[in-house]
Structure formats: structure tokens, C-alpha cells
Image (cartoon, rainbow, N blue to C red):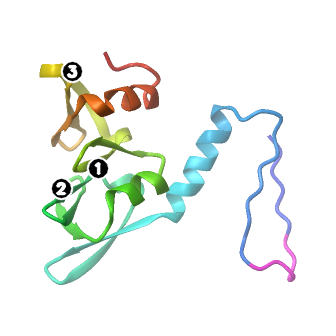
Amino acid sequence: MKISINKHAQYGEAEILINCAENDSSIDQIVELLQESTIDFIGKKEDKKFVFKAKEVYYIESIDDQCFLYTKNDVYDCKYRLYEIENKHSSFTRVNKNIVVNYKKIKFFKSSINGRLDATLNNGDRVEISRTYVGNLKSLLGGQVK
């Protein structure tokens, strides 16, 4: 892989352009890393605001028009729409009507009733994956979910 950086005073905002014959998994990983480094989440707790990188967020849950951001050890209020999160970041996917999860934080699955799955995350939290979203998660994980 060849990497070139062109600096010139005429350039405004930095732009990253990838030229390739085919889009393979290494290109996808590079793009994902670039996206993760530019997207931050803001959570609020006790009148203080905290900034998180996407890789620090385990999942975001919407309850009664209020969103909560879950990290390894804590929960924060946040002002995000679930559809915005799943559209902006490839590591986040919807698993039920009220939750988008960072699928890279899933430790293991357990089958549940009616085609649902119970996922345990690396921080010990458990989320239910409704059968509507099982197929999408399965494709994200390369078909590993049964």
C-alpha cells in the first residue's frame, strides 16, 4: 500500500482520497478507523459534560424520549437520535427498537425465545436483540450468529 500526503497552502479542509482497484477488507478497516477518530460522543452527568470516542461507547438506549449513553463503568445522559448514530458510525447497529449497540463490544450471545438473542457485552451489561435485527447483526459479524 502506498501512502502520499500532499501539503499546499491552497488546500482548505483536509481530504482523504483512496484510490484502489477493488474495495477489500483492509480498505474498509482504514475507513472505519478514520471515521472512529473523527466522531465523538458527548455525555452529561451531574451538570458536567464528558467527551467519548466511539470505541469507548458500548451502547445507547432511548427510554421515554431520553437517551442514555453506556460506557464500561457508567451511564450518561445524551442528546442523540438512534438513527443518527447508526447512520454515522459503522460500529453501531440497532438491535431493538430502543437500542443501538457497538457490536465490537459484544462478548457473547445466548439464544432466547422466539428467535431473539441475549447479548452480553464486555462490560457485563446484557441487551436483547430482537429477531428483526438478528440477520443484520449476523451479516456484520460474518455469519457467526446462529
- Give the residue displayed 29% in from the left and 36% down from the top: 106
Q: Which mark is residue 115?
A: 3
Label 1, on which residue?
58
Q: Is residue 127 above or below residue 83?
A: above
Foreground: disc 2 or disc 1: 1
Q: Earlier in the sequence, mark 1 or mark 3?
A: 1
Left or right of 31? Residue 21 is right
Q: Is any atom of residue 112 visible in this view?
A: no
Which quarter of the figure is the C terminus placed in? top left
Mark 1 and mark 2 in contact (Cβ < 8 Å)? no
| Amino acid bearing label 2 | Asn
The crowd level at tag 3 (other Cα within 10 Å; few <14, some 14-19, many 20+) is: few
Q: Which residues are magenta?
A: 7-12
Viewer-side residue, 66 vs 69 = 66
Counting labels gives 3
Mark 3 and mark 1 in contact (Cβ < 8 Å)? no
Residue ranking furthest to the top? 146
Marks 1 and 3 sit apart, C-alpha to C-alpha, by: 23 Å
| Amino acid bearing label 3 | Gly
Q: Earlier in the sequence, mark 2 or mark 3?
A: 2
Marks 2 and 1 sit apart, C-alpha to C-alpha, by: 10 Å
Element type where label 2 sits in the image: loop
Left or right of 9? Residue 85 is left
Label 2, on which residue?
73
Which quarter of the figure is the N terminus placed in? top right
- Give the residue displayed 39% in from the left and 19% down from the top: 144
